Amino acid sequence: MSDKYTLSSLEEGEECRVRSLLLEGVMRSRLSDLGLIEGTRVVCLQRSFSGDPTAFLIRGAVIALRSEDSSRVEVERCI
């Protein structure tokens, strides 16, 4: 897949698989601790009324991420 997608580009109900985290430091550690690692399936559940943050289903847990952070998680869309 040559196109690069991020979590922030997903539509509600769309599913993807994590390719890589383009984050460093504390935020990278926090997301990894939540199970957001390479190969993890993620579903975009719902965007807030204002559009930020967005709720994602990650390994059975609903996690809300700001677009600032979700735009730094590279994914591949599931077909």
Image (cartoon, rainbow, N blue to C red):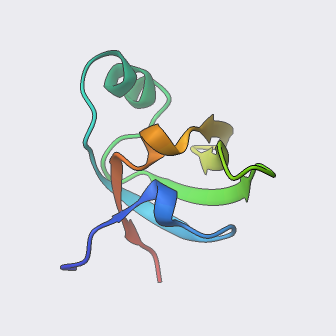
Q: Is residue 77 above or below residue 9?
A: below
Residue 13 percent across, percent down from the top left = 68, 69
Looking at this view, name the residue that lies furthest to the right.
49
Q: Quadrant of residue 5?
A: bottom left
Report the side of 41 relative to 11 (left or right): left
Compared to 25, does 53 lie above or below?
Answer: below
Residue drawn at point x = 25 percent, y = 42 percent: 22
Numbered label tally: 0
Q: What is the x, y in percent for residue 1?
A: 22, 79
Q: Quadrant for residue 69, please give it.
A: top left
Q: Is residue 59 left or right of residue 25?
A: right
Q: Residue furthest left?
A: 2
Q: Residue at x 42, y 51 (%)?
A: 40
Residue 30: which quarter of the image? top left
Farthest residue toward the bottom?
A: 79
Q: Which residue appears farthest toward the top when viewing the image?
A: 26
What residue sits 48% from the left and 65% below the top? 9
Residue at figure coordinates x 38%, y 29% from the top left = 32
Give above or below for 76 relative to 61: below
Q: Nearer the viewer, residue 29 or 61?
A: 29
Is 32 placed above or below 38 here?
above
